[in-house]
Amino acid sequence: DLLLSNSCIPFLGSTEGLDFRTLLLDEERGRLLIGAKDHIFLLNLVDLNKNVKKIYWPAAKEKVELCKLAGKDAHTECANFIRVLQPYNRTHIYVCGTGAFHPLCGYIELG
Protein backbone atom coordinates (compact mmCIF):
# COMPACT_ATOMS: atom_id res chain seq x y z
CA ASP A 1 0.00 0.00 0.00
CA LEU A 2 2.80 2.42 0.84
CA LEU A 3 4.49 1.84 -2.51
CA LEU A 4 1.24 2.29 -4.41
CA SER A 5 0.50 5.57 -2.63
CA ASN A 6 4.06 6.87 -3.14
CA SER A 7 4.35 7.28 0.63
CA CYS A 8 7.70 5.58 0.93
CA ILE A 9 11.06 5.23 -0.76
CA PRO A 10 12.38 1.65 -0.75
CA PHE A 11 16.08 1.16 -0.04
CA LEU A 12 17.55 -0.34 -3.22
CA GLY A 13 21.16 -0.42 -2.09
CA SER A 14 21.16 -4.01 -0.96
CA THR A 15 20.11 -6.71 -3.36
CA GLU A 16 22.31 -9.28 -1.61
CA GLY A 17 19.90 -9.98 1.26
CA LEU A 18 22.25 -8.76 3.94
CA ASP A 19 20.07 -9.57 6.95
CA PHE A 20 19.65 -6.17 8.61
CA ARG A 21 20.11 -6.32 12.38
CA THR A 22 20.27 -2.86 13.94
CA LEU A 23 19.48 0.78 13.16
CA LEU A 24 20.75 4.12 14.43
CA LEU A 25 18.85 7.27 13.51
CA ASP A 26 20.93 10.45 13.36
CA GLU A 27 18.24 13.11 12.99
CA GLU A 28 20.70 15.96 13.57
CA ARG A 29 22.62 15.09 10.39
CA GLY A 30 19.69 13.55 8.51
CA ARG A 31 21.22 10.07 8.34
CA LEU A 32 20.28 6.50 9.09
CA LEU A 33 22.90 3.87 9.92
CA ILE A 34 22.02 0.24 9.34
CA GLY A 35 23.96 -2.73 10.68
CA ALA A 36 23.76 -5.86 8.58
CA LYS A 37 25.65 -9.04 7.76
CA ASP A 38 29.27 -7.95 7.14
CA HIS A 39 28.17 -4.36 6.30
CA ILE A 40 27.31 -0.99 7.78
CA PHE A 41 25.22 1.34 5.62
CA LEU A 42 25.01 5.12 5.99
CA LEU A 43 21.88 6.48 4.30
CA ASN A 44 20.48 9.93 3.63
CA LEU A 45 17.04 10.33 5.27
CA VAL A 46 15.70 12.50 2.44
CA ASP A 47 16.51 9.89 -0.22
CA LEU A 48 17.67 6.50 1.03
CA ASN A 49 19.24 5.69 -2.34
CA LYS A 50 21.22 8.92 -2.77
CA ASN A 51 24.93 8.86 -1.84
CA VAL A 52 24.70 5.53 -0.02
CA LYS A 53 27.90 4.80 1.85
CA LYS A 54 28.75 1.23 2.72
CA ILE A 55 31.46 -0.21 4.94
CA TYR A 56 32.37 -3.84 4.34
CA TRP A 57 33.42 -5.36 7.68
CA PRO A 58 33.59 -9.16 7.50
CA ALA A 59 34.83 -11.50 10.18
CA ALA A 60 38.45 -12.60 9.87
CA LYS A 61 38.86 -15.60 7.56
CA GLU A 62 40.40 -17.72 10.30
CA LYS A 63 37.45 -16.98 12.62
CA VAL A 64 35.01 -17.99 9.85
CA GLU A 65 36.92 -21.26 9.37
CA LEU A 66 36.83 -21.97 13.13
CA CYS A 67 33.11 -21.26 13.10
CA LYS A 68 32.55 -23.75 10.26
CA LEU A 69 34.70 -26.37 12.02
CA ALA A 70 32.45 -25.96 15.07
CA GLY A 71 29.53 -27.09 12.91
CA LYS A 72 27.92 -23.70 12.36
CA ASP A 73 26.30 -22.75 9.06
CA ALA A 74 28.71 -20.75 6.88
CA HIS A 75 25.98 -18.50 5.42
CA THR A 76 23.73 -17.85 8.38
CA GLU A 77 26.07 -17.97 11.39
CA CYS A 78 29.73 -17.56 10.37
CA ALA A 79 29.79 -13.87 9.52
CA ASN A 80 30.13 -10.53 11.25
CA PHE A 81 26.54 -9.59 12.07
CA ILE A 82 26.55 -5.96 13.22
CA ARG A 83 24.63 -5.85 16.52
CA VAL A 84 25.56 -2.51 18.12
CA LEU A 85 25.49 0.99 16.62
CA GLN A 86 25.82 3.48 19.46
CA PRO A 87 26.68 7.19 19.41
CA TYR A 88 30.02 7.75 21.12
CA ASN A 89 30.51 11.48 20.62
CA ARG A 90 29.71 14.08 17.95
CA THR A 91 32.17 12.59 15.47
CA HIS A 92 32.22 8.83 16.15
CA ILE A 93 29.92 5.88 16.67
CA TYR A 94 30.74 2.71 18.56
CA VAL A 95 30.11 -0.45 16.53
CA CYS A 96 30.17 -4.11 17.52
CA GLY A 97 29.68 -7.25 15.49
CA THR A 98 29.54 -10.98 16.18
CA GLY A 99 32.78 -11.69 14.27
CA ALA A 100 31.79 -15.33 13.55
CA PHE A 101 31.41 -16.03 17.30
CA HIS A 102 34.50 -13.90 18.13
CA PRO A 103 32.96 -10.48 18.87
CA LEU A 104 34.78 -7.37 17.75
CA CYS A 105 34.11 -3.69 18.28
CA GLY A 106 35.46 -0.44 16.92
CA TYR A 107 34.81 3.23 16.31
CA ILE A 108 33.69 4.78 13.04
CA GLU A 109 34.37 8.42 12.28
CA LEU A 110 31.33 10.05 10.73
CA GLY A 111 33.23 12.81 8.92
Image (cartoon, rainbow, N blue to C red):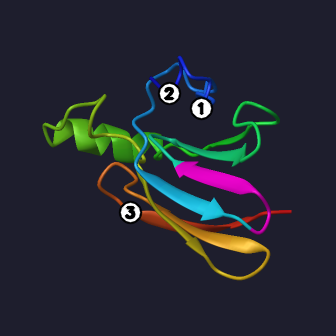
Q: Which residue is mark 3?
A: 103
Q: CA distance from mark 3 to mark 2?
A: 37 Å
Q: Name the image quarter holding the C terminus.
A: bottom right
The residue drawn where x is 51% and y is 56% is 23
Residue, far bottom: 89
x and y percent of residue 44 in the render?
A: 75, 45
Which amino acid, mark 2? Leu
Which amino acid, mark 1? Cys
Q: Which residue is mark 1?
A: 8
The residue drawn where x is 47% and y is 43% is 36
x and y percent of residue 60 in the render?
A: 47, 46
How packed mark 2 is, by other alpha carbons closer than 10 Å (few <14, some 14-19, many 20 or more), is: few
Location of residue 18 by image quarter: top left
Mark 2 element type: loop
Q: CA distance from mark 2 to mark 1?
A: 6 Å
Mark 3 element type: loop
x and y percent of residue 96 in the render?
A: 48, 64
> Does 16 sit above or below residue 63?
above
How packed mark 3 is, by other alpha carbons closer than 10 Å (few <14, some 14-19, many 20 or more), is: some
Circles 2, 1 touching at the beta carbon (< 8 Å): yes
Which amino acid, mark 3? Pro
Mark 1 element type: loop
Q: Which residue is mark 2?
A: 2
Residue 109 drawn in magenta = no
> Does 25 sit above or below residue 54?
below
- Residue stretch rendered in magenta on the structure: 28-34
The residue drawn where x is 70% and y is 65% is 27
Q: Name the image quarter holding the N terminus.
A: top left
The first of marks 2 and 1 along the sequence is 2
Instruction: Between label 3 and label 2, give the one nearer the viewer.
Output: 2
The first of marks 1 and 3 along the sequence is 1
Q: CA distance from mark 1 to mark 3?
A: 35 Å
